[in-house]
Image (tube, grey):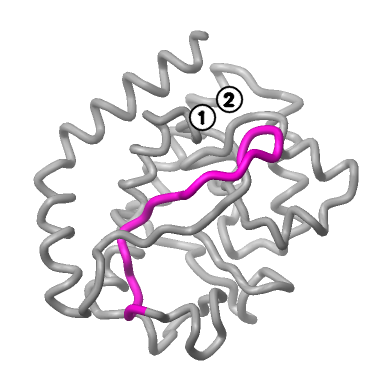
Amino acid sequence: MLRRVFDLVVAAAVLVVTSPLLLLALVAVPLESRGSPIYRQRRIGLEGHEFEVLKLRTMVSGAENLGAGLAVAENDERITRLGALLRRSSVDELPNLINVLRGEMAIIGPRPTVASQVEQYSDHQRRRLSIRPGITGWAQVNGRAGLPWDQRIELDLWYIENRSWKLDRQILRRTISTVFGGDDLYRDEGPAWTSPDEDK
């Protein structure tokens, strides 16, 4: 219950503080590339329940049907100029806060992924679904998308086994550093996933 209260308070506060920036982005995104400024994708959350994650659109409309599909690499031609800036600053993740208010996500936890990846989980890896997915997490501050997928899962599982308020404070501090540094948005050798999806 305390964690849920924490999530609600933080999500609401950050949305209020960043609302001018978010509104500006909602207007600017379709000016550069026609289409909805919000990108929606079905993801798997707590205990395997599916939900629709919300993000600011950073690529041209219909990008999932072009090029590498849902996989995204650095210098991907489908990423718009504004989209590159939104990704670099992680502003594109702000709509995730709405998912937190809905109870579909938490502030801290494993990043949610798509059903095709969850279907490949071993029984050991399925423990990653035992808590709400988060906007940031232990894997996010220890390499982000620069890590192989199996390693990211192991980091998330370690977090689940060792979760504490002290560890959460550390993750939040390192998240701020990671966001402002803009590092590890992409893997050097290409997408981390064997099936197409890439999420910071």
x then y, percent, for residue 64 = 49, 78
Quadrant in the rendering for residue 193:
bottom right
Residue 115 shown left or right of residue 132 in the figure:
right
Residues 10 and 187: in front is 10
Extreme residue in the right direction: 123
Disc 2 is placed on an element classified as: helix
x then y, percent, for residue 105 = 49, 35
Extreme residue in the top direction: 1
Query: Circle 2: is it few (<14), some (14-19), or many (20+) Cα within 10 Å?
Result: few
Instruction: Identify the magenta region.
Output: 45-61
Residue 143 shown left or right of residue 58 in the figure:
right
Residues 198 and 186: in front is 198
What residue lies at 61% left-to-right and 40% top-to-bottom? 45
Quadrant in the rendering for residue 150:
bottom right
What residue lies at 39% left-to-right and 51% top-to-bottom? 54
Question: Residue tagged by mark 2?
Answer: 167
The answer to whether the residue labelled 1 contacts the one labelled 2, judged by CB atoms less than 8 Å apart, is yes
Query: Circle 1: is it few (<14), some (14-19), or many (20+) Cα within 10 Å?
Result: few
Number of residue marks: 2
Q: Is residue 134 above or below residue 65?
A: above
Q: Amino acid at mark 2?
A: Leu
Q: Amino acid at mark 1?
A: Gln
- The CA span between labels 1 and 2 is 5 Å
Determine if the magenta segment contains residue 92. no
Disc 1 is placed on an element classified as: helix
What residue lies at 17% left-to-right and 72% top-to-bottom? 30
What residue lies at 66% left-to-right and 61% top-to-bottom? 147
x then y, percent, for residue 80 = 28, 80
x then y, percent, for residue 51 = 53, 44
Question: Residue tagged by mark 1?
Answer: 170
